[in-house]
Amino acid sequence: MFRDVSSCNTYNYGDALYWDARYVQEADGAFDWYQRYSSLRPFVRNYIPPSSRVLMVGCGNALMSEDMVKDGYEDIINIDISSVAIEMMRRKYEYIPQLKYMQMDVRDMSYFQDEYFDSVIDKGTLDSLMCGTDAPISASRMLGEVSRLLKPGGIYMLITYGDPSARMPHLNRPAYNWIIKLYNLPRPDFKRPGDCSSTKSYLEPVPLTENGLLPADFVLEDPDSHFIYFLSKFSSANVPLPTLATQRCMKKTLSRYNKCSQSSSEVAVVEYKAAEVKQDCKEADNLKDEIAKLQMKQLQLLGKDLKGMSLKELQHLEQQLNEGLLSVKEKKEQLLMEQLEQSRVQEQRAMLENETLRRQVEELRGFFPSTDRPVQSYLECYPVERKSSVISHSIHSPDVTCNYTIEKGDSDTTLYLGLPSDYHKRKKPERESQSNDSGSQLQML
């Protein structure tokens, strides 16, 4: 079921030794399997942009990569299992920087990181693996590597002899998640019969059934024709698989859509703003009505605008006012009671503070001894007779006596600072007596 023996022979096309020996014999030649680039060019240009990073698997000594570079492609990496073929191609194209050659097995391309290539081109490599005894395993490993290396939306272009019945079981697996389109291309030397009036274009996709097979009424013009599968790695951006022509149409459509959406968005913004303004005006009118009602209600409560009110409305207003007055009285009584309670608390606090101060005074008195002798005051005031002098004063030491007399004044005072008067009489300093004696002596002289 999985092995295609339609184009197989006794050679082991999956063995590197076979290919090394073959390329040694064809050292000076070049061979393109199935189709030349001139026949494949419309398909390649339609699905693979020239700026793509392309991987050519099983390149051999074919000229297709060289032709693609001449057609404007910029980056093509060629791999083959045969080291002989790779060495020959390296020497041949060493001065063409767009072409790189590496010896590698398509079943193990771990040298490259995931999602490294924009497209992979396979011209007969899968067919060679399908001729081996381990065809299902080899094909699965190769296709798994191709799927890993492709970027989302990348293209795997497969040119093969295998029709959908032989290839779809390997290609149409959920693990790969590929979107598949199929084309049929006759051999390069095929000629239509002279009586054939078919207007079929080879650039039109071949219709497939839901199972990915050819319709029962589909007839191949060339029984040995080649099938070209374009498999796109699924991503949210590439459903369904677009060609370059459809991409251009899509860009134009998107451009028109963006313009329309931009204009429609501007219109929508204007409409939204208009609706918003209208809503604001409506809310403002409602607020004005509410304010007018509240003002009228306030006047009615004040008894200033009672016109047009019925008896029932007046009774209701009276009830509201009575309830309001009752609430005011209750609130007033509550505030008075609170103030009274605060005053009582302050009074108790003051009494406690006074009691504390009284105790402190009693404790301080306990530190001083009690005595029956009264303590004499050191500050005394003595009256002085009025004199005619404007200002007179006398100072005695050690006691100080200040006599001030103001002419025509209302009062006279004498301030004595020092010990009491009886103390002066008891202890009269000798200095004063000596001064008196000296004064008398001066008078006698």
Image (tube, grey):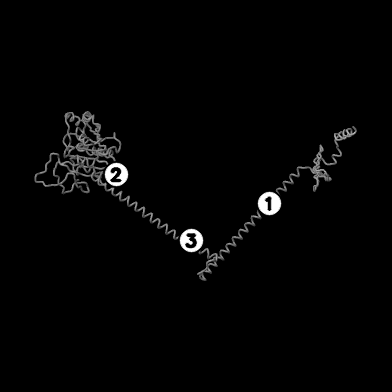
What is the x, y in percent for residue 309?
A: 51, 69
Q: Which residue is mark 1?
A: 350
Dot 2 corresponds to which residue? 235
Mark whose residue sits in front, 3 or 2: 3
For badge 3, the amino acid type reads Ile
Looking at the image, residue 175 sits to the left or right of residue 220; the answer is right
Asked whether residue 103 appears in the rendered view, the answer is no
Give the residue drawn at x 83%, y 41%: 420
Q: Are marks 1 and 2 in contact (CB under 8 Å)?
A: no
Which of the pair 49/121 is nearer the observer?
49
**Residue at image coords 30%, 36%:** 113
State how far apart marks 3 and 1 are (Cα). Answer: 52 Å
In the picture of the structure, the residue carrying the numbered disc 3 is 291
Q: Is residue 401 above or below residue 288?
A: above
If the image is split into quadrants, where does the C terminus sit? Answer: top right
Q: Amino acid at mark 2?
A: Ser
